[in-house]
Image: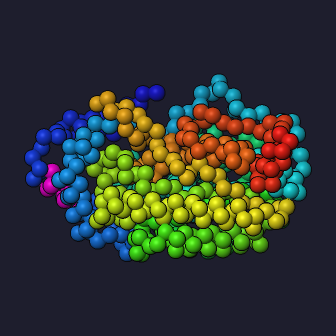
């Protein structure tokens, strides 16, 4: 699909006008001037206390322009930017899964016999990734906008063909689904917030339970709920201090997760929780970045892109790995397998994700930035659609057999079958492994 727009024309003009042989003093001046402008705008719209000082950010960006101009700033302007929205599924292509005639039978009493059509309510907890910040952005201004309507975990804009999300896939099985977000409405259960840290999850969960109880559409005791949680990135990227002991940081991460999951288990009946492992923020270090991405990287993950260079990558990677161990230890303990109406499942697709490669107009294989927003950190709508596809597949894959490879939006979709009619849990995964059916 080829899309021509005024934006693409202006980008082409910019590429033609920027040359890699500009004198270094001009590059330095450009780096400092644009950095000051962008950071000032960003600081005015966000909590400046969580950001590095303007001088630090400008100095770092000047270093990038000095040391890596030809490799990482100006050459990368030749990256072939693709549309950051998914290509719609053609209208003549049917929904890949069969919605059986008994789809609307009575809801089960056990979370281990939960089918897609049994989910009545969707909700999310976490940070700016799960809330869709910048998903529809085509400039720095758009990064400040919450686009929950296209978030892979809570979005309900349009339908599965053009906006692939977990709610839009579930709506094929249950058109009466509640809680998804649409543009211009606050009648949804997306509780995530930008700049949220792990310690904020419990208050988000408390607000979620209160909001569900007060919503006349929700039968709180009878309706089955699916809650997706993704958190920890701000703790890693903007911690104070930046590089705590991995063991200590992981214990704190685990304790905050335990608090929110214990609360949901005690206060939210009939709930299936998807816990997504924290993403490896150090993977962004290898991504070839535009100038805007280089600026925003310093702001959004100062612990990675601050003074220290590649040494920061090693330190933060150790923390990410420790977080993953803590998450698995908590869920594999069986703590959330003791009730028939509640469970927590790790859907591991986020643990080692990197964007796929694409060949630019120079013939170089670089990260496909069309899956990321204009800051090269948050997800674009196309990236959200890919996340929805991967989480959906994880839901229908048994423990130990969940895929972690990157999958294009709607490229491969797992479906319920006669032998696998239910979302997998720790309990029914063991049954499946023993007898080949749930």
Q: Is residue 253 magenta?
A: no
Q: Could you tell me which residue is drawn at 36 percent across and 69 percent down?
A: 51
Q: Nearer the viewer, residue 266 or 98?
A: 266
Q: Nearer the viewer, residue 94 or 248?
A: 248
Which quadrant of the figure has residue 109?
bottom right
User: Relative to 13, does residue 281 appear above or below in the rendering?
Assistant: below
- The quadrant the C terminus occupies is top right
Q: Could you tell me which residue is drawn at 84 percent across and 48 percent down?
A: 431
Residue 14 spot, x, y in % from top left: 23, 40
Q: How is the image coloured?
A: rainbow
Q: Is residue 405 visible?
A: yes
Q: Is residue 198 visible?
A: no
| Principal secondary structure, stretch drawn in magenta | helix
Q: In the drawing, does residue 151 fall left or right of residue 283?
A: right
Which quadrant of the figure has residue 218?
bottom right
Q: Nearer the viewer, residue 387 or 365?
A: 365
Q: Could you tell me which residue is drawn at 63 percent across and 43 percent down?
A: 403
User: Relative to 246, does residue 117 appear above or below in the rendering?
Assistant: above
Q: Is residue 32 magenta?
A: yes
User: Relative to 215, does residue 70 appear above or below in the rendering?
Assistant: above
Q: How many marks?
A: 0
Q: In the drawing, does residue 148 fall left or right of residue 293?
A: right
Residue 114 spot, x, y in % from top left: 81, 50
| Range of magenta residues | 27-36
Residue 181 spot, x, y in % from top left: 61, 54
Q: Could you tell me which residue is drawn at 21 percent across and 58 percent down?
A: 63
Q: Nearer the viewer, residue 340 or 437?
A: 437
């Amino acid at each position: 699909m080829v899309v021509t727009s005024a934006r693409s024309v202006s980008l082409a003009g910019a590429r033609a006008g920027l040359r890699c042989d500009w004198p270094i003093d001009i590059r330095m001046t450009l780096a400092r001037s644009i950095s000051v402008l962008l950071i000032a705008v960003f600081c005015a719209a966000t909590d400046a206390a969580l950001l590095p000082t303007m001088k630090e950010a400008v100095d770092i960006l000047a270093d990038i322009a000095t040391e890596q101009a030809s490799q990482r700033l100006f050459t990368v302007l030749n990256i072939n930017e693709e549309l950051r929205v998914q290509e719609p599924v053609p209208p003549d292509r049917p929904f890949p899964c069969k919605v059986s005639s008994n789809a609307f039978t009575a809801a089960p009493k056990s979370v281990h016999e939960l089918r897609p059509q049994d989910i009545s309510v969707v909700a999310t907890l976490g940070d700016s990734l799960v809330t869709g910040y910048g998903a529809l952005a085509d400039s720095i201004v758009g990064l400040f906008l919450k686009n929950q309507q296209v978030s892979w975990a809570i979005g309900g804009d349009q339908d599965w063909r053009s906006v692939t999300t977990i709610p839009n896939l579930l709506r094929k099985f249950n058109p009466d689904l509640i809680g998804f977000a649409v543009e211009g409405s606050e009648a949804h259960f997306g509780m995530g917030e930008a700049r949220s840290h792990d310690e904020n999850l419990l208050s988000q969960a408390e607000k979620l339970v209160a909001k569900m109880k007060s919503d006349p559409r929700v039968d709180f005791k009878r309706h089955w709920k699916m809650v997706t949680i993704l958190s920890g990135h701000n703790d890693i990227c903007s911690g104070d201090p930046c590089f705590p002991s991995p063991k200590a940081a992981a214990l704190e991460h685990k304790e905050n997760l335990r608090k929110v999951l214990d609360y949901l288990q005690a206060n939210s009946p009939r709930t299936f929780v998807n816990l997504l492992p924290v993403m490896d923020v150090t993977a962004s270090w290898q991504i070839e970045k535009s100038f805007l991405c280089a600026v925003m990287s310093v702001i959004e993950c100062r612990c990675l892109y601050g003074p220290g260079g590649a040494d920061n990558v090693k330190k933060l990677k150790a923390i990410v790995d420790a977080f993953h161990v803590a998450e698995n230890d908590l869920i594999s303990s069986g703590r959330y397998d003791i009730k028939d109406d509640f469970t927590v499942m790790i859907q591991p697709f986020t643990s080692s994700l990197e964007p796929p490669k694409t060949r630019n107009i120079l013939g170089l294989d670089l990260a496909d930035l069309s899956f990321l927003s204009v800051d090269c950190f948050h997800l674009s709508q196309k990236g959200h659609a890919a996340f929805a596809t991967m989480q959906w597949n994880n839901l229908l894959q048994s423990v130990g057999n969940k895929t972690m490879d990157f999958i294009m939006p709607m490229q491969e979709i797992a479906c319920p079958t006669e032998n696998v009619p239910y979302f997998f849990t720790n309990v029914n995964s063991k049954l499946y492994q023993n007898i080949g059916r749930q």
